[in-house]
Image (cartoon, rainbow, N blue to C red):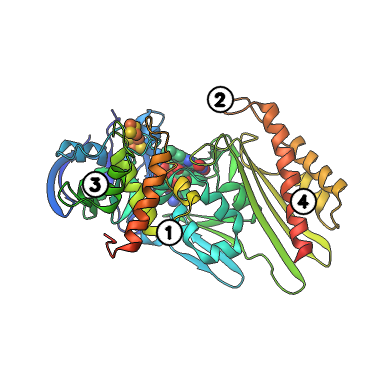
Amino acid sequence: MYVPFELEMPGDLAGALGALAAGTGAKTMAMAGGTNLIVDMRAKRERPDRVVGLGRVGALRGMECGEEWISIGGGTTVTDLLQSKEIAEAAPSLVESSRLFAGLMVRNTATVAGNIACGSPAADLVPPLLALDADVTLASVAGTRTLPLDEYFLGYKRDVRRPDELITRVSWPRLPQSSDQSFINAFYKLARRKGDAITVTGVAVTLVVAGGVCTKARVALGAVAPVVFRARDAESVLEGRALTPARIDEAARAAAASSCPIDDVRASAAYRLHTVEALTRRLIAQAWRRSTDQ
Amino acid sequence: MSTERTIMLRVNGRDEPGRFPAHRTLLEALRQIGHTEVKSGCEKGDCGACAVLVDGMAVDSCLTLAWTAEGAEITTVSGLGDLDALHPVQQAFSDGGAAQCGYCTPGIIIAAKAIIDRHPDPTEEDIRIGLSGNLCRCTGYTKVFEAVSEAAAIMRAGSDGR
Ligand SMILES: Cc1cc2nc3c(=O)[nH]c(=O)nc-3n(C[C@H](O)[C@H](O)[C@H](O)COP(=O)(O)OP(=O)(O)OC[C@H]3O[C@@H](n4cnc5c(N)ncnc54)[C@H](O)[C@@H]3O)c2cc1C
Ligand code: FES
Ligand code: FES
C-alpha cells in the first residue's frame, strides 16, 4: 500500500543531519511522530525513497524554561506540552491549543517541529507560537541558523527550510510578569467539534499591559489564509493605548480585513471572516478585562 | 529498495519475531504475527481502533512503523487481561454493555487505560477529550463514557492499578 522506502533510525543529532545530507539524489525526508508523514505516504502525496526516523534523537527533546527565554526541542510532543506546569504558566495559549489537538494517541506522538514543518494553515501550535514571538532554530551539517517563526513560512505549504535542515529548537522570550507589568496569552480553536477536528478558525492573542496601557499586542490567525500569519494592522491598533470597546472593534475588523479565507468542506469563507472577527474581538476583550482585573 | 529485516517485537511480555520491510506499520506487523485483537479501521489516525500501548503510552499503531517499535514494550488489549482475569476496564465495559459490535473496543479500552493512568479520577471532560481519537459506530458513546468512569472508580477503590 505504501510506496516502499528505506528507513534509518540514527541515535543522535549528528547522525540524523548526516543522513539527511547524504540524501542527495534520493528523496529523503525526516519523520518525527509520523502523524502527517505516514498519512501522506499512504495517500501517496509524499513518496520519499529514504525516511530518517527522529525518535531516537534525544537532542530534539527537552524543555528549558529560563528566566528570560523558554526553549523547547523540536521533538517535544503535544502531550509533553500538556504535561508541563512551566509551559502552562508561561504560555497558556500553547496548552489550550494542545488540549484540543487531535486525539490522545496522536497527541502522544505529534511533535512541535512536525507541526511547523508541515506548513499547514491549520497547524494549531503555530498561532500560539507566533503570538509568543517564537524563533525557530534550523540545523544542518553546514551549521545552524535561527530566524523568527514569522519569517519561516513563504506560502501555502512552502517554507524557508532546506531539505537537509531540521528544526531543532523553538524558543521565545518569557513574557513579563511583575508588579507593574502583566501579560495575557490565549488561544481559541473553532472547529466542527471540540475533539479531534481540523480548525475552522484559530486565533491566538498576547497582550502585555503596563500602567493601564497595552504596551504590546500580538494577534495570530490560523486557517483563514494560505499560511498562519500575524495580523499586524490589528496589533498596531492596540499597541500603546488603553483599550476601549471601539478600539477592540477596530482591531477585530482589521484582523478580518487581513484574512483571505477559502471555502472548504469544513466552513465557508464568509463564515471564517465572520468568526475571525468575532473571536478576535472576544479574545482581546477578555484579555483586556483580565489584565485590568489583576 | 525495501530491505526486509527480522526484528523482535516484545508484545504483552513475550518476544515475538517477525520479518518486515521498513514501510510496514506496527498495525500490519502485529496482525501479521497473529495479534488480530488489534483492529484496522482507517489506517490514518482517525478512528483509534488500532491503538496499543508502546512503553505505556497509547499510540495509533497505524501511524507507527514496526521497526521503530523494536525494543519497546507493546501492550495490546489482550495484554491487559484475559477472560480468566479481566482488567477492571475490560470488566467495566463488559458489565456496562459498553460494546456492541466490538470493533472499536480494543482501541477504546487501550485509550481508556491511558486516560485513567493519567487521571485516576477523570472528569467527564477528561474522558470525552481523551476518547476523541476513538470512533464508535454503534454505541453512541454514552455507555462507553460511563464504563470508563466506572473502571476508574473500581481502580481507585481496589489497589488493582494494573
Ligand atoms: C487524526 C489526526 C488528527 C490531527 N489533528 C490535528 C490537530 O488538531 N491540529 C493540528 O495542528 N494538527 C493535527 N494533525 C496533524 C499532525 O498530527 C500535526 O501536524 C503534527 O504536529 C505533526 O507532527 P509529527 O511529529 O507527527 O510530524 P511528521 O508526520 O513526523 O512530519 C511532518 C513533516 O514535518 C517534517 N519534520 C518532522 N520533524 C521535523 C524536524 N525536526 N525538522 C524539520 N522537519 C521535520 C517531516 O519531514 C514531514 O514533512 C492531525 C493528524 C491526524 C492524523
Ligand atoms: S486504524 Fe489506526 S487510527 Fe484508524
Ligand atoms: S461497538 Fe461497534 S464500533 Fe463501537
Q: Is residue A19 visible?
A: no
The numbered mark, 3 or 1, whose residue comes first in the sequence reads 3
Residue linked to disc 2: A265
Mark 2 vs mark 4, CA separation in Å: 30 Å
Disc 2 C-beta below 8 A from ligand 1 = no
Mark 3 vs mark 4, CA separation in Å: 48 Å
Q: Where is residue A273 shown, x and y percent of the image?
A: 71, 32
Residue at point 57%, 28% (across, down): A266
- The correct choice, above or below, for A164 with respect to A1 in the image is below
The chain holding disc 1 is: B
Are both tags, 2 and 4, on one chain? yes
Q: Decide which of A90, A83 is in the foreground and name it.
A: A83
Mark 2 belongs to which amino acid?
Answer: Val
| Quadrant housing the N terminus of chain A | top left
Q: Where is residue A171 shown, x and y percent of the image?
A: 56, 60
Q: Decide which of A231, B154 is in the foreground and name it.
A: B154
The chain holding disc 4 is: A
Disc 3 packing (10 Å; few <14; some 14–19; many ≥20) = many
| Quarter of image, res A180 | bottom right
Q: Decide which of A178, A41 is in the foreground and name it.
A: A178
Mark 1 vs mark 2, CA separation in Å: 37 Å
Residue at point 21%, 39% (across, down): B37
Residue linked to disc 4: A285
Q: Decide which of A17, B64 is in the foreground and name it.
A: B64
Question: Is label 4 or label 1 in front?
Answer: 1
Q: Where is residue A118 shown, x and y percent of the image?
A: 49, 41
Residue linked to disc 1: B121
Mark 4 vs mark 1, CA separation in Å: 34 Å
Mark 3 vs mark 1, CA separation in Å: 23 Å
Question: Is label 1 or label 2 in front?
Answer: 1
